[in-house]
Image (spheres, rainbow, N blue to C red):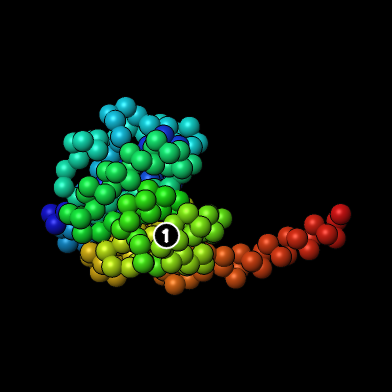
Amino acid sequence: MKNRRIGIIGYNGVMALDIAGPVDAFAAVAEYSDQSRQSVGHEVVVIGLTRAPFAAQSGLLIKPHTTVTEAPPLDTLIVPGGPGLRIPATQQKVSSWVSSVAPRTRRVASVCTGIYGLAPTGVLDGRRVTTHWRHARNVASRYPRLHVDPNALFLKDGPYYTCAGVTAGIDLSHSLIEEDFGPRTALAVARELVVYLKRNGGQEQYSEPLQYQVQSADRFAELIA
């Protein structure tokens, strides 16, 4: 089994789908591997600041596999977003740990506002990054050394990856799966997850179909007002 260990750090106030989306995408690789007899996959570990379960923004409790002090070596590190990461004490703990492991980790990624855990470390300085469109201006203001693109779905700059809102974490995961095991496996995972379209990182967050739907809803609201 050619496993690549992926660590996802968790904390109180995390966005649950920022963790669950990538976890399920990577887990689907193993299922496809069993069916195709390719013997490839990922080992995913959820890493807590402590051993205690942490509460997502929604109230969902998540039990970590290990802690920041006991985490094994990682191939890939993912920092999920959530309002908890914008609490100074939590941000400091997460970014301090990320600083210590990033130099020996092949890939480091943030999902949505997980960029608040990466930006303070300096690893993104001078790089093109993205985040949820609603937070892009704040990120650019707080971290002026980052080149923030408020429209991109996800971006890769060197070994660092950043992406937009929660479902973009699944798109990013598909891209990482494709890097590791090729397009056939990535498409099989997309099919398994019933993803309508495997989106690439160059697409805008605010898609034309969504914009059209919003405009149509606005016009309908005006008509019945």
Q: Which is more toward the observer, 24 or 109?
A: 109
**Left or right, 200 with reference to 181:** right
56 to 165, vertically: above or below: above
Q: Which is more toward the observer, 193 or 69?
A: 69
62 to 162, vertically: above or below: above
Count of numbered tags: 1
Would you identify the image quadrant in which residue 119 lies? bottom left
Residue 174 in view: no
Give the residue furthest to the top: 52
Task: Give the residue at x 73% y 60%.
Answer: 217
Q: Residue 223: image x %, image y %? A: 85, 60
Assign the C terminus to one quadrant of the image. Answer: bottom right
Task: Classify 10 Å Cα crowding around label 1: few (below 14), some (14-19), many (20 and above).
Answer: many
115 to 13, vertically: above or below: below
**Left or right, 51 with reference to 144:** left
Residue 133 in view: yes
Task: Give the residue at x 28% y 68%.
Answer: 158
**Left or right, 49 with reference to 133:** left
> Mark 1 sits on what residue?
163
Task: Give the residue at x 53% y 54%.
Answer: 138
Q: Which is more toward the observer, 145 or 191?
A: 145
Would you identify the image quadrant in which residue 163 lies? bottom left
Could you tell me which secondary element the residue under label 1 belongs to? strand
Q: Residue 142: image x %, image y %? A: 47, 54
Q: Residue 169: image x %, image y %? A: 41, 56
Q: Residue 213: image x %, image y %? A: 67, 64
Task: Give the residue at x 48% y 71%.
Answer: 203
Assign the N terminus to one quadrant of the image. Answer: bottom left
Amino acid type of the residue that numbered disc 1 sits on in the rendered structure: Cys
